[in-house]
Amino acid sequence: MKYALVTGASKGIGRAVAIQLARDGYYIIINYNSSKVGATKTLDEVQQVGSAGELMKFDVTDAGEVKVAFDGWAQNHAGEYIEVLVNNAGIRKDNLMMWMPEEDWHEVLNISLQGFFNVTQPLLKNMLAKKFGRIVNIASLSGIKGLPGQVNYAAAKGGLIAATKALALEIARKNVTVNAVAPGFISTDMTQGLDEKELSKNIPAGRFGTADEVASLVSFLVSKQASYITGEVISINGGLYT
Ligand code: NAP
């Protein structure tokens, strides 16, 4: 059995990634924080495509909660390990910096950046020992070029991109790759309140992307065929960023 963990897999991009990796033959560990119903729906879809999985609840910002979940999992899976990790959990709390409440700065950074640390560090040991692993971090266009109203989000995703590059260098020799995917505008709950028609005028492809399109890219990055790609940031944005 090959195990893949997707954080924030209760909806949106995380759910699409979970289903695609299930199609690829992985057993999926579906992390969620508040949306058990959504996570259960993801599990149903994982099973519908012929694989299996389980729910794993934790808040990525809470290192203690993550540890308890991983220790419990390890007890039930002696000799096995999680070889694929997709750090997808993320939120946005947009505001001009002038008016940004300090807690919105911390919350956005804690989920995307501290969450990356909390979840990735405990899984590294086994990936290195087994000499195979794949880590894919879901960053954002905002983390590459910055977008107004997203100083917190751009900092979180920019930090995630830098961490991706540094970690990739640390562990490349062990056959563990670390890459980031940087989506532009993707149709999910996160982008629901946006004026899609108006924003699409500025996207060369003329539309928002789909979560399935992001999932296909993640699927390639975790595949054996992508063994020589590490420390990269791959944009998926319909040509928006050049
Ligand atoms: P979404 O539909 O709002 O889903 C966000 C997911 O993150 C949910 O499953 C949520 O789980 C989870 N999550 C939030 N806080 C968490 C926490 N503290 N611990 C564990 N899980 C947590 O968003 P999405 O559009 O699919 O975005 C997924 C990722 O892609 C995010 O990192 C986002 O920044 C990035 N991204 C999205 C876009 C876009 O246009 N949609 C563009 C660029 C990058 P619960 O509901 O269970 O709390």
Image (spheres, grey):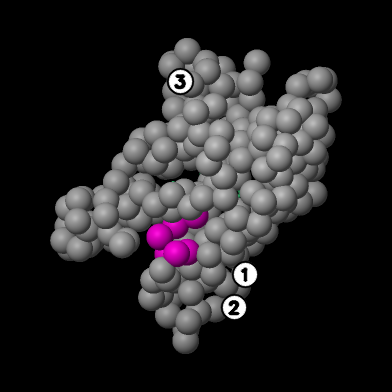
Q: Which mark is residue 106?
A: 1
User: Which amino acid lies under the numbered mark 2 shown in the image of this protein?
Assistant: Glu
From the image, tell me which residue sits under label 2: 102
Magenta-tinted stretch: 139-144
Residue 32 seen in render: no
* Residue at 43% across, 16% down: 49
Disc 2 and disc 1 in contact, CB within 8 angstroms = yes
Residue 142 in the figure: left or right of residue 25:
left
User: Could you tell me which secondary element the residue under label 1 belongs to?
Assistant: helix
Q: Position of residue 132 (x, y in %)?
A: 68, 30
Residue 200 in the figure: left or right of residue 51:
left
User: Which amino acid lies under the numbered mark 1 shown in the image of this protein?
Assistant: His
From the image, tell me which residue sits under label 3: 23
User: Which amino acid lies under the numbered mark 3 shown in the image of this protein?
Assistant: Arg
Vertical placement of residue 130 versus 63, above or below: above
Q: Residues within 10 Å of mark 3 (few under 14, many from 20)?
A: some
Vertical placement of residue 234 versus 17, above or below: below
Q: Is mark 2 within 8 Å of ligand 1?
A: no
What is the chief secondary structure element of the magenta stretch?
A: helix
